[in-house]
Amino acid sequence: MKRIVILAAIAFAACAPTAPPPVAAPSAEDRNFIDPRTGFNQTVNPATDKKFDAAWRSLIAGDLADAARRLTDIRSKEPDYAPAELALALIDLRQGAVPSARRKVDEVRNARPRYLAAEVYDAEVAVAERDVQRAYELYRDIAARADAPPAAAQRLGELQTQLFDTLFNAALHAPSNESAIASLRSALQINPAAGAARILLAQKLAAAGRMEEAAQALDPIAATADADRPEVQQILAEIDFSRGRYEDAIARYERLVRRGGNDAAARRLEQIKLQYAEANMPAQFRRAIEDSEITRADLAVLMYWKVSSVRFAQNLSAPPIAIDVSETPGREELIRAIALGIYSVDPVTRRVGPNAPVNAAALARITARLLALRGADCARGLPQSDAPRVLATCGITDPTLAGPDLPVSGRTAATVMEQVDRALK
């Protein structure tokens, strides 16, 4: 009886189903490598699938030698069984043989372009090759598929962050403004909501004088809290200025200055105010200040509009008559310079030479004479003939430093006259 019971137990055990071996969990290193059979839409011999399952278990468990042996055996008998080739590519990656993995994956992808597992492995080989741009683009396509693996979206997010950071850092250390702009544009294609990159792009574009592009770059943050950031307001002020909206630019810079701690904004505010005033000046002033080689008439115009002591001088005597000023642009300003004694009329020819060019030495002499005649304290007791000494004492940039015979631009003369105006106050 006992023998019968034992035999029955043995027979029952033989008939009971065999439990499958436990599946090893993928390591963190391999978490993005899906089962190579995913998306392999081809009828497979059950025996082959069983062999591959055993090989895949060995690979995931870390027994690469056993996995390689099993996979090579499958490939030798069924060369078209692509999952085995992808698994061998994963073994190559585990062993650091990235070029070999690339060849295997490319071979599979060329034969089966829409094979999901092959797309994933292609992307992961790109990661191993440090080609984050390609990996990101591949995962973007994978995540858009209806049969995308669950981890695809997370992996896409990781690569998006990595690629954005790479492009943003490249912009920060770019050798040129143009390369920084290119990197920032690429970064914003990856993450359009990145405010810091968008602001930096606008700053780079503004620095390059591409104001309309800078305005377009800032459009997406116009209605956000970032729009009130000082650096954004400064860019917007420069955009207003470039469009000729001086008052808007001045208002923005005044708000920045009121916030305090921005000396650069205060200096720029004064510059814009000055240019706003210049834009509203008479035509003869605008022509004179933009002239690359001024004449005596141009300098008279600049003296009049830049030096308060010339413009508002009182109790002037009648100036000597000059016969060559009637058709000269800036005639009134030229007559004022004659009346103040800054310009002399030749007693014989009765000419003042309004069209004579002014070089650096002439500008220095006329400036020293102007300071002395208008009673500058700094010029008191100094001979007008010693123009370099007068200018140095009064804190005026000597225009002869670059060369006494060089022509003088309107901007240079205007700067000297602004310094004269400060010296006379």
Image (cartoon, helix red, strand yellow):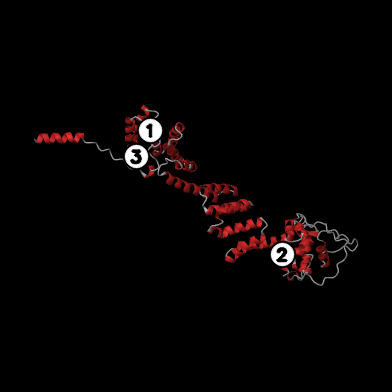
| Residue at position x 64%, y 57% in the image | 240
Front: mark 3 or 2: 3
- Furthest toward the right, the residue is 348
Q: Is residue 363 visible?
A: yes
The quarter of the image holding the C terminus is bottom right
Label 1: which secondary element: helix
> Which mark is on residue 419?
2
Q: Residue type at mark 2: give it.
A: Gln
Compared across the picture, whether 232 is left or right of 327 comes to left
The quarter of the image holding the N terminus is top left
Q: Nearest the camera: 124 or 298?
A: 124
Return the x and y of residue 101 as percentages of the image width and height. 43, 36
Label 3: which secondary element: helix
Gap between marks 3 and 2 measured at Cα = 80 Å
Return the x and y of residue 372 as percentages of the image width and height. 78, 68
Gap between marks 1 and 2 measured at Cα = 83 Å
Earlier along the polypeptide chain: callout 3 or callout 2? Answer: 3
106 in relation to 25, above or below: above
Return the x and y of residue 279 as percentages of the image width and height. 72, 59
| Residue at position x 88%, y 64% in the image | 321
> Which mark is on residue 60?
3
- Furthest toward the bottom, the residue is 315
Gap between marks 1 and 3 measured at Cα = 14 Å
